Amino acid sequence: MKYSVPKGTKDILPEEIYRWQKAEQVFAEVCGQYGFREIRIPTFEHTELFMRGVGDTTDVVQKEMYTFEDKGGRSISLRPEGTAGVVRSFIEHGMTSLPSPVRVYYNITAFRYENVQKGRFREFHQFGLEAFGAKGPAVDAEVISILTLFFARMGLTQTHLCINSIGCPVCRTEYNRILREYYQPGLAGMCHDCKGRYEKNPLRMLDCKEPHCHTLAADAPKLLDHLCPDCREHFEGLTANLDDLGIPYTIDPGIVRGLDYYTRTVFEFVSDHVGTQGTICGGGRYDGLVEMMGGQSVPGIGFAMGVERFLMEVEAQGVAIERTPDVHLYIAAMSTEAAVFARKLAFSLRKAGVGCETDLMGRSFNAQLKYAGKTGVPYLMVLGDDEIASQKSRIKNMKDGVQTEIDLSNQSGIIATILNSKLHD
Ligand code: HAM
């Protein structure tokens, strides 16, 4: 039997991991600069958490969750996103008593049973963050600016920001009435889920993926045209803050997001490159979620970015991610004695922080040189009995062929030759 990965999952291979590591490092760096600290939450939670947090009329909860009963008879779900778990953790650990805003970021896997296509997986990765406690639009703009900075630092230029407001429970009551009025005549022809959503949560009808419902949603009245005065003021505050920071945006009244917890600001960064899945990241404000989940009334805002989609975008835009070598030096040995010397030298250089490799396969000298060439190691040292006797060898820069004489007893000289790559690059 030949095994392969389950549909919608994939291996991230050593050849490509540097791209992931670079993105992780830059995201952590940028979040840190804004005062965000990392949080790690469980991969699975009680199903109820997502039903309440994400919303039981959403596609994510209704159709896409990986839910099972554990051996103790509890209903458990793999997390389809990070916000619900972070909010649970925020409440469970009494973070309301910490100085506000409480700011956390995360790097997680998430699971959704979706139709697999380009940029859409069943197990995927998200970089995300949440900020609790600040209610003014300045934090909305600051959170968005994190993405702008992250993209810029990674070299991405062709992403654009779309923003919208989906109001608060006050404007939504009236808007739901208007929506029902709009949908009423065509309701009989809509999908089973939308018929259910019509009474319970008509806003969800706007992001239904069924073709007929999708077409109807395009002409539906927009919430942006029905905001209450407070929500309108918040939205104007957001655009003013974005203007102040020089962050360009498009107002897109069609953004409703697929999760139930949003209030007021919602936003997405989109691209034209990633096939049908052009949304690289999405987020927004969720001022009622903490309270709804059993905590105090604390406003919140955050986003999550699909890492696979982000990296596809990096590739589509032809952005090169620099690959820094972990192994700097290959020490090739011509004899058994030289091999012993090479292993000892390699160990000592590694202790000093220089990545080294020596032969572990019993290869001939020529085969070692061939191997070193294939690995792309930047420096090569050759050791034979003569070199050991004289304590002199050479380090060859594999890129330009320039050789530098070194003294084998002078470890710091060897290290300087290797690490000071400016000598030859
Ligand atoms: P979301 O829009 O459901 O929001 O997901 C955020 C991002 O995750 C998407 O823009 C996309 O890049 C990526 N993503 C979602 N589903 C898939 C999939 N099946 N395959 C690949 N990538 C995917 C959230 O998850 C919210 N928790 C974001 C948030 C945080 N809002 C406030 N705080």
Image (cartoon, rainbow, N blue to C red):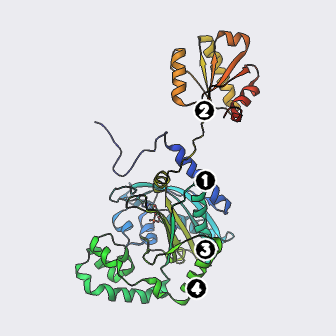
Badge 2 crowding class, 10 Å Cα cut-off, few under 14, some 14 to 19, many 20 or more, is some
Image position of 335 with respect to 221: above or below: above
- Cα–Cα span, label 1 and label 3: 22 Å
Tell me which label, 3 or 2, sits earlier in the chain.
3
- In terms of sequence position, does the residue under pointer 1 or pointer 2 come before the other? 1
Residue under numbered circle 1: 26
The C terminus appears in which quarter of the rendering?
top right
Up-down: is 247 above or below 217? above
Q: SS for tag 1?
A: helix
Identity of the amino acid at label 2? Answer: Val
Residue 122 falls in which quadrant of the image?
bottom left
Whether ligand 1 has any atom under 8 Å from the Cβ at mark 4 is answered as no
Disc 3, SS: helix
Location of mark 2 (residue): 327
Label 2 to label 4, Cα distance in Å? 56 Å
Whether residue 134 is visible:
no
Say which of marks 3 and 2 sits in front.
Answer: 3
Q: In 3D space, how far apart are the residues under numbered discs 1 and 2 (Cα atoms)?
A: 22 Å
Residue where numbered disc 3 is placed: 242
Q: Can you tell which of label 4 and label 3 is closer to the viewer?
A: 3
Q: Earlier in the sequence, mark 1 or mark 3?
A: 1
Q: Using the rendered view, name the quadrant where residue 149 is placed.
A: bottom right
**Dots 3, 2 in contact, CB < 8 A:** no
